[in-house]
Image (cartoon, grey):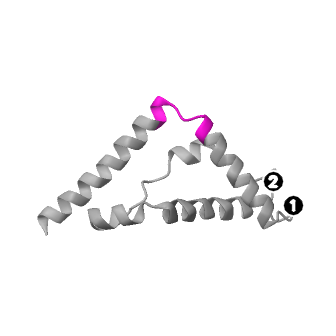
Amino acid sequence: MRQDRADNLAAIPYGSSLEEIQEGVSAEAVSYSAGLLVEAVRSYESAAISARQKKLSLTEAQMIAANLIAKASAHLDDKTMTEQIDRIRKSIREVKSREVNT
């Protein structure tokens, strides 16, 4: 995924209650996210590359997704961590606020 597209992604809504958030953020949720990345790789289309034309197999897409996750892990930095911590804490505050107001 190009950096400019990654920077513009909205925060993922996790649920309507803090309990749902805690249940949803699990190995299953991480696995689901990896699956979404595999599907993004398999359906990738640009002016230069077409996953469909290259007949990318599921195994190849899974390996690419694993490499992308590893690459992102290797490039984790203070700016990214700060942005993610702020984003997640804001989401949790919003959910808590809705729970108090209902």
Mark nearer the N terminus (2 vs 1): 2
> How far across and how far down the image is residue 20, in percent?
33, 67
Mark 1 nearby-residue class (10 Å; few <14, some 14–19, many ≥20): few
Query: Disc 2 marks which amino acid?
Result: Ile
From the viewer's perspective, is 35 left or right of 10? right
From the viewer's perspective, is 65 left or right of 21? right
Q: Quadrant of the C terminus?
A: bottom left
Identify the residue at image location x=37%, y=66%. Answer: 23
Quick one: which residue is furthest to the top in this view? 78
Q: Main secondary structure of the magenta part?
A: helix
Identify the residue at image location x=41%, y=39%. Answer: 83
Start and end of the magenta stretch?
73-80
The residue that disc 2 covers is: 49
The residue that disc 1 covers is: 54
- The answer to whether the residues at label 2 and label 1 have Cβ atoms under 8 Å apart is yes
Query: Disc 1 marks which amino acid?
Result: Lys
